Amino acid sequence: MNSEKCYSFDKFREEFKPYGLTCETWIPRVMPRYDRHNEIEINYLPQGNITYLRHNEKITIPNKRFTIFWGLIPHQIIHYENVEKYYVCTIPFAHFLSWKLPAQFVDSLLRGDILYEQTDEYSQYDEFLLNNWLKDSGVNMQSDLILLEMQTRITRMAHHL
């Protein structure tokens, strides 16, 4: 991973406080409470897995799978294995809705589904993109470029599910 700075969940963070457009590396931690924010969240784990509690259901995110969900649905990491760092990106909800993605895909996210690629076919491509988004979100925030690439990647995913 190409980022020096890593984040982890802040237990004092205000509920519903927006993250905005981000692409960061995070260190997984068991979360003492749910997180909620009105952005679409992307997770990508180069190795290991993370288990979230959502809707009183445990959902394990596998590694090397581009994963997306709506952050407004309460989500809490309750377990992780063999993950040193992972990618977390957030997309403001209004940007996401403006992309006019297939209705079935958007409906699944708004129902609270966590969607992820079924194979690791795109994993090298995804790590390349995420590393570029990390670089572009650095000193010279290239938000337009990041959003275009996010839109393209998520559109590709929406048409393959």
Image (cartoon, rainbow, N blue to C red):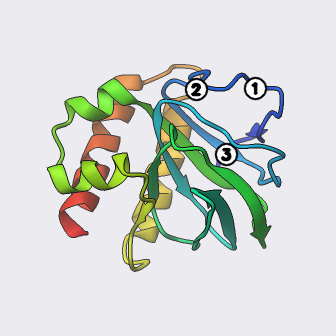
Of the 4 image quadrants, the one containing the N terminus is bottom right
- In this view, the mark in front (3 or 2): 2
Can residue 13 be seen here? yes
Distance from the alpha carbon under mark 1 to that under mark 3: 18 Å
Q: Amino acid at mark 1?
A: Arg
Disc on res. 19: 2
Whether residue 57 is situated above or below residue 18 in the rendered picture: below
* Badge 3: residue crowd in 10 Å (few <14, some 14–19, many ≥20): many
Give SS at disc 3: strand
Whether residue 130 is situated above or below residue 40 in the rendered picture: below
> Residue 141: x, y in percent?
49, 21
Q: Earlier in the sequence, mark 2 or mark 1?
A: 1
Can residue 1 be seen here? no
Residue found at x 37% / y 77%:
121
* Badge 1: residue crowd in 10 Å (few <14, some 14–19, many ≥20): few
Residue found at x 53% / y 48%:
131
Q: Is residue 31 left or right of residue 142?
A: right
List the residue tagged with mark 3. Answer: 25
**Image-quadrant location for residue 101:** top left
Verify CB contact (< 8 Å) between mark 3 and mark 2.
Answer: no
Q: Amino acid at mark 3?
A: Thr
Residue found at x 51% / y 24%:
20
Q: Amino acid at mark 2?
A: Tyr
List the residue tagged with mark 1. Answer: 13
Whether residue 20 is situated above or below residue 74 in the rendered picture: above
